[in-house]
Image (cartoon, rainbow, N blue to C red):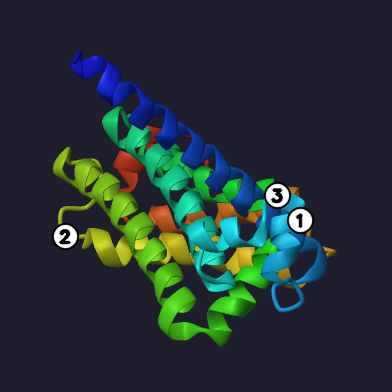
Amino acid sequence: MDSSLENRPVGLRDRQKQERERRIIKAAERLFARKGYVEVAMEDVAGRAGFAVGTIYNYFPSKSALLLAIVRRETESLLASGRKILEDPPRNPVAGVSAFTGIFFDDFTRDDRRLWRELFGAAIAEPSTLGQRLFEADVQLVTQLAALLERYRCDGILASDIEPMPAATVLYGVCFTWMTAYLMNDAISAEMVRNEIRRGTAIAMRGLFRDADAISTITGGAEL
């Protein structure tokens, strides 16, 4: 028998599985944002996705597993965008770091802030599972940012004695602080958060350059 015929049904099944997972995760996202994580039952997710509840359990054994899948999807999207920047970073390190923080911001504000509130709340309630996964995602993102800073350091643009990982943690902290504020206060707009992250990033970056002349050269004399 032609081996290509044997492989064809497997590929179709994989695509069908991925589509079902996508529909289930999307249904869960909408319900968690609208009703709250605690109030949503797996039966609710099944009804929203258009599947029998047994089908839902075949893919996700619990609500925690569903929430973990949402976190994993968001993380994979962010890391993919980060890799594109690392492949061809801007010469200007402020622009490069701003591009990274823009990834965080755009992803965070794309979804309803109620979904992130539910996610953070569930992570606090379940620190050994959801909390740990969120922390691991943060570490991956900070590690990517540290790789970018290391590249600029090796190119002689940033100070030779900087430690990329602690420096990246500081920059990520600027993002996290304002994103948390955005979650906690409906009066804080997405545009306000974008501006404050940009300002905070520029301030933090001042301390990473080799010297004042380097700042002027890289930024073309523009104020950070």
| Residue occupying the point 54% across, 47% down | 21
| Residue occupying the point 27% across, 49% down | 149
Q: What element carries label 2?
A: loop
Q: Residue 31 in the image: x percent, y percent?
A: 75, 60
Query: Which amino acid, by three-letter code, is at mark 1?
Result: Gly
Q: Earlier in the sequence, mark 1 or mark 2?
A: 1
| Residue occupying the point 49% across, 64% down | 68
Q: Residue 41 in the image: x percent, y percent?
A: 71, 72
Question: How many neighbours does mark 1 have within 10 angstroms: few (below 14), some (14-19), or many (20 or more)?
Answer: some
Which residue is the site of mark 2? 161
Q: 203 or 221: nearer the eye?
A: 203
Checking the image for residue 49, the label placed there is: 3
Q: Do the residues labelled 1 and 3 touch (CB within 8 Å)?
A: yes
Checking the image for residue 47, the label placed there is: 1
- Residue depth check, mark 1 versus mark 2: number of the one nearer the observer: 1
Question: How many neighbours does mark 2 have within 10 angstroms: few (below 14), some (14-19), or many (20 or more)?
Answer: few
> Quick check: 89 left or right of 123?
left
